Amino acid sequence: MSDWLNPDDLTALWLTLRLAAVTTVVLLILGTPLAWWLARTRCRIKLLIESVVALPLVLPPTVLGFYVLLMLGPEGPIQSLGGPALAFTFTGLVIGSVLYSLPFVVQPLQNAFSAVSNDLLEAAAALRARPWDRFVSIVLPLSLRGFLTATTLGFAHTVGEFGVVLMIGGNIPGETQVVSIAIYDHVEAVDYQSAHTLSALLLGLSFVLLLLLYMINGRFKMGASNA
Amino acid sequence: MIEVDFYLQREDFTLQLASTLPGRGVTALFGRSGCGKTTLLRCIAGLERQVRGHLHVQGEVWQDEKQFRKPEQRPIGYVFQEGRLFPHLNVQRNLEYGLRRIPLTERQIKPADVVELLGLGELTRRLPAELSGGQRQRVAIGRALLTSPKVLLMDEPLAALDAISKAEIMPYLERLHGELDIPLLLVSHSLEEVSRLADYMLLLDAGRLQAAGPLQEMLTRPDLPLAHSANASAILETTVVEHGEDQMSVLACAGGHRLLISRENIQTGQPVRVRILARDVAIALQPPLESSVNNCLPVVIAEISDDPHPGHRLLRLDLEGQILLSRITRRSCERLALEPGKAVYALIKGITLE
C-alpha cells in the first residue's frame, strides 16, 4: 500500500477512521437516550431540542466549527473553568464531529423508536418486564434498522467532514490531519496524483458503506413492517 | 376477593366506581362501548397511572393512598383486544416472555400444559405475522397464563375476531374456566359471550357502576336493561342425565326437573349451561296435553313488569330458586289473569346449549 500511498496520507487515513469510529460510538451512547426522549416526550421543549439537533444539517460547517473553536479556545468556557486546552487536539475533533454528525444519528434512532408502539411496551410491562428490560427486549430488536442506519450515516458523515475540522483541528499530521484536509493540501500543492488516490479511496469507502447499509436494510424488510 | 374503589378524571370522561368482585370464577365487565370497562381493567392492571383510590386483590394491597404498584409488580395476566404479540419473537419466545421474568418458585403453570390446553403445539416456531387472528389470541392467552397470574384480565379477547375464529377460541376459554382456578375478569359488550362464560357481572354505564351481581340475577332483573333487550334470556345450570335413542338428551335442572334438548356432543354427568330466551317461553295454566312443546316446567310467577313494547309484559318465573324470563303479550297476561305468586307452567320452545 505504501507504494502508492505516502506515509503521511496513511496516517491521515488511519486518523480519519479512528475519528469516525470514536465519534460514532460517542454518538450512539449520547444519541440513544436523546432520541428515546424525543420519541416519547410530549413536552413542549421537544421542538426546541429537535431544531437544535437538526441545525448541523443546514449550517455551514465553518459556522459550527467557529463556535466550537470559541468554546474550546483559550478564552472559551471550558478553559476558563479550568478544563484542558482542546482546540487543535484529537479530542477537540471528536467534540466537533459529534455535534456535526448528531442529526445523522439521532434522527434515524428517533424514527425507529417512534415506530415502536406503546401497546407493545404495555404488554411487556404486564408480563413483568421493567423499563430497562422493556427497552432491551422490545425496543432494541425492533429498532435494529434504525441503529444500523444511524451507525452507518454517523460514521460516513464523519469521514466526509471538512469545514469543522479545518476550523478547530487545523492541519497537524498524526493529530488532526484527516483525509479530506490532506486531499485539500495535495491539491493546493498541485500534487494531483496523491489527491486522486485519496479521493478515490474515500469515494470507494463511502460507496461500499452505503451499499452495505442498503443491502442489509433490504434484507430486514420484515423488521421494517414490524417497526 | 377483589376490592376496587377508583376515581379517574379525564377530559371527557370520569370513572368513579367502588365494588367487590368475587375472587374466583369469571366476572364480566359489561356495558356499552365508552362506558369505562376497558379503563377499569387497565386501572386494575396498573396501566392507568392517574387513577386514585384503592385496590386490594386476594388480601394484597395493589394500590392505596401510600403506594401504587407498577404493572410489572402486579401478578396479573393481561390479554389485550388485539393480542399484542411481540412481532420479532416466535410463538415459543412470546409464550416464554413472561415466564422467564417470574421467579422459579412462582411458576405454577407449566408451558407444556398451556400448549396442550390452548392447542399451540403446531405453532411454536411461527412468527406472529404468520398466525390467524384466532391463533394469535390463543398465544396471547397462553403468554398471560404462563406468568401464573393471580388474576387474569381479558379485554374483549374475541372482539377483533370473525365468527369462525370466535367459534374456534370459545371452547378454549371454556376449558380455561373449567380447569384453572384463577379469577378471570372479562371485558365484553356481547351478551352472548357473557352468558356463555361469566358467573358474575358488573354492569357499567358512563363510568359508573350501574349494578353488580351473579349473572343469572343480572340477566333477569327487570330494573336493568338486559332483561328488556330483544335477546333477553335466562341461563340455567343443568347436568346431563342421559341420551335417548331418538337423538335427544335429558338434562336435570334445579329441583330435579327435566329438560329435553337435541343431542349434542356432551357426556352423561357433565354440567352444562343452557340459555333460554324470554321470547321462547310461553305460559299455560295447565300442562298442555296435546302439544309439540317438549319442555313444560311448573313455575311460580315472581314478578310482572312492563317491557319496552307497550303491548308486551315481561314475567319473571321462579323455578325452585332459579329464574326464567318469559315475554308474552299484555293481552295474554290479562286473559290468563296472571299475577305474582300464581303457579303456572312455563312452556319452553327453544333451549340453547352454551
Image (tube, coloured by chain):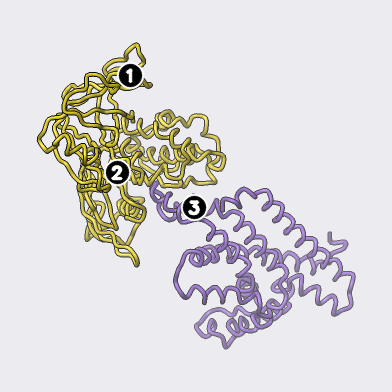
Chain colours: A purple, B yellow
Residue B177 placement, left or right of B86: left
Secondary element at tag 3: helix
Do the residues bearing badges 2 and 3 touch, measured as CB atoms within 8 Å?
no
Task: Farthest residue to the left: give it.
Answer: B341
Q: Nearer the viewer, residue A83 or A198?
A: A198
Amino acid marked by disc 1: Gln
Nearer the observer, A175 or B347: B347
Q: Quadrant of residue B278?
A: top left
Residue A89: give x, y in percent of width and height.
Answer: 65, 75
The residues bearing labels 3 and 1 have C-alpha atoms spaced at a distance of 50 Å
* Type of amino acid under label 2: Ala
Q: Is residue B310 visible?
A: yes
> Which chain hosts label 2?
B
Q: Amino acid at mark 3?
A: Val
Residue B275's place in the image compared with A108, above or below, is above
Question: Residue B109, how many percent across, how many down?
Answer: 36, 33
Chain letter of disc 3?
A
Q: Nearer the viewer, residue B98 or A224?
A: A224
Name the residue at the bottom extreme: A75
Residue at screen point 57% across, 59% down: A112
Question: What residue is pinned by disc 3?
Answer: A136
Q: Real-space Cα distance between discs 2 and 3?
A: 36 Å
* Neighbour tally class for label 2: few under 14, some 14-19, many 20 plus, Cα within 10 Å: many
Q: Which residue is mark 2?
A: B28
Q: Is the residue B346 above or below the residue B100 in the image? A: above
Q: CA distance from mark 2 to mark 1?
A: 27 Å
Category of crowding for the residue at label 1, using alpha-carbon neighbours closer than 10 angstroms: few (below 14), some (14–19), many (at least 20): some
- Identify the residue shown where x is 35% and y is 21%: B262
Instruction: Give the residue number, with chain letter if any, for mark 1.
Output: B267
